[in-house]
Image (cartoon, rainbow, N blue to C red):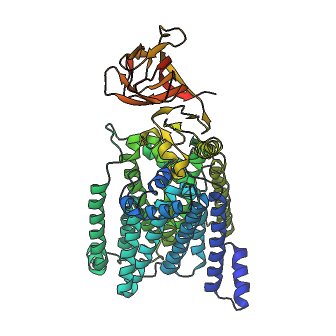
Amino acid sequence: MVEPVTRRLLGTLRDEGVGTRELVSGAALVLFLAQLAWRAWIVVPGWFYADDLLLLEDAARPLHTVLLEPNDSQLMPLGRVVAALVAAAGPYAWWAAATSVLVLSAAATAACWLMLRTVFGPRPFVLVPFALFCFLPLAADASSWWAVALNALPAQVAFFLVVTGFVLWSRERRPRWAVLVVLAYLLGAASGPRALLMALPVGAFVVLFCSGTGRGTLARVARRHGPLVAPLAALGAAYLVLYRATTPPPVQVTGATPWIDVADRLLLSSVLPGLVGGPWRWDVAADPLSVPDPTVAVRVVAVVAVLAVVAVAWRRRPSTTWRAVIVVLVQVAGTYVAIALGRGLQVGAVAGQFTRYLPDLAAVLPLALAAAVLPVRVPDAPSVRERALLPRLPSVPRAALGAALAAVLVASLVNAAVYARPWHEDFPARRYVENARASLLADPRPVADLEVPELVQLGLHYPRNLPSHVLAPYGDLVDARRQGNDLAVLDTDGTARQPLVRGAESAPGPVAGCGTKVVQGEPGRLALDRAEMPDFPWTTINYAASVDGEAVLRFDGREPVRMQVLSGPHTYLVNGDGAYSTLEVDVTTPGLTVCVDRVAAGTLEALR
């Protein structure tokens, strides 16, 4: 599949004394550096989003207290360690987070090359799957979204090292290769629970490519690889026990599993278009996060192109092609079931379009593609020279195959750039946090602990979608309260503004120039229409006081709420625990007189 021009160039260089090994290694180094530069262009202008904010908040706590604490159902101790290092670099230090993504990306790419080089040798064709791994936008989220990268990239490293270790063990039976496999598997487990799915494609690869052919394959697997399989099985079981003990179910939803719809979105929107450099159209589902949304034409082209590649490979190498296809299908099936029984129950079929779930497949593809064409360098590997099982097809010119590969790589670059663009812009979470910092530096004051917009942090994470949590890395700069005097409100862009409560309002008080007069022993009572309030209303009390002191608030006779009173005119905000009909204000400081002008209870927002 290497173009004739490339072959002539290789021949010329060989004539000058440069061997194939050096040429292939040099080309791989060029691809490695190009991919690293490309990833830097994608990730460096980005910023934190969603789960990233949760990781940074938790990083303020001692590491040992959060190491085994799941992050949105992800038990990821390795990610916790990296998050602690990034948090130590300063509040919202994106440069440190971007550096961690690039380091992990470089490690994954290097491990991929090590696997290909070890399993198949320094053959020119290994550059094809290596290039596709470097640039396909199949798992685009792992390039831009920090939290996803912390799960995905170490898991890819682990997969490549496990395969490398298994192949070396199959050749030499040395204990150090068994140790490599076990340590790599532990690395995958430390990155997150989805890494355990690597057991599926690795197991399929070992059975189909590393255990001979004919009857008794499973017996040969047990005999040859038992010393490796047994500890891995024990580690997997131990991890599942730990996961169940520390991690609640990711979703608490009852209802039918959307099997068909998830399969449609996963295969026809995400996987197949991604394999040919697509999808050519992204839908910004939650700015900056996009999901693939290919047209029908792109879907059809993707299906035809993938089937054509499989047919060509099958024609040339039938015995290895069907094995490679099974390895891929095993991974796809594992991913599909995990999505359908996980996020599919929570958010529906759109979960099948989330590219955050495809880094595992992106790691399996280079192994499977190379294994379909090249011999695996282990004893008793299946032969790549067998009579074709399909009718003879016209030969495909190598130049055409090279042009197709180049087209896929160009498409990958274009589609990855389109995906990354929203991450480079002033998206809601970035704008909110940066504006909040600038606003509170310019005018330090307490703010109401009001839920941030959904595009900054999801409401399902309550109370971690409150400013007191979202802005926690800024420390004392942010004083977010559920009640207090003269609180500001952060608007949807994060700018501090005056508060406005919309809902029920009290009638004017009976005392001219004062409203409702309150002194010690003579509480004031104000009636409001609870039908105009939400379930947990904010109450604003406009008052004027003679001196500093204290008062007690009672909402429909519930538990009293202590109120700090300041001399002069002020506005007191308090978030209640339910709608109410009567507010009672009772002064507890002798000599203190409070005039309550207006009370409103309802939804709190920023006054523009």
Q: Is residue 374 visible?
A: no
Picture layout, residue 168 above or below residue 292: below
Residue placed farthest to the front in the image?
591
Observer able to see residue 309: yes
Residue closer to the observer: 443 or 47: 443
Q: Where residue 523 sits in the image (x, y, percent)?
A: 38, 17
Q: How many marks?
A: 0
In x, y percent, where is residue 18? 68, 89
In the image, what residue occupies the spot 50% across and 49% down? Answer: 472
Quarter of the image with the N terminus is bottom right
Residue 29 position within the rendered picture, expressed as x and y whole percent measured from the top left: 63, 76
Residue 508 percent coordinates (x, y): 50, 10
Residue 287 image-quadrant placement: top right
Q: Which residue is pictured at 46% across the width and 74% down the height?
A: 386
Residue 541 left/right relative to 244: right
Q: Is residue 525 above or below residue 325?
A: above
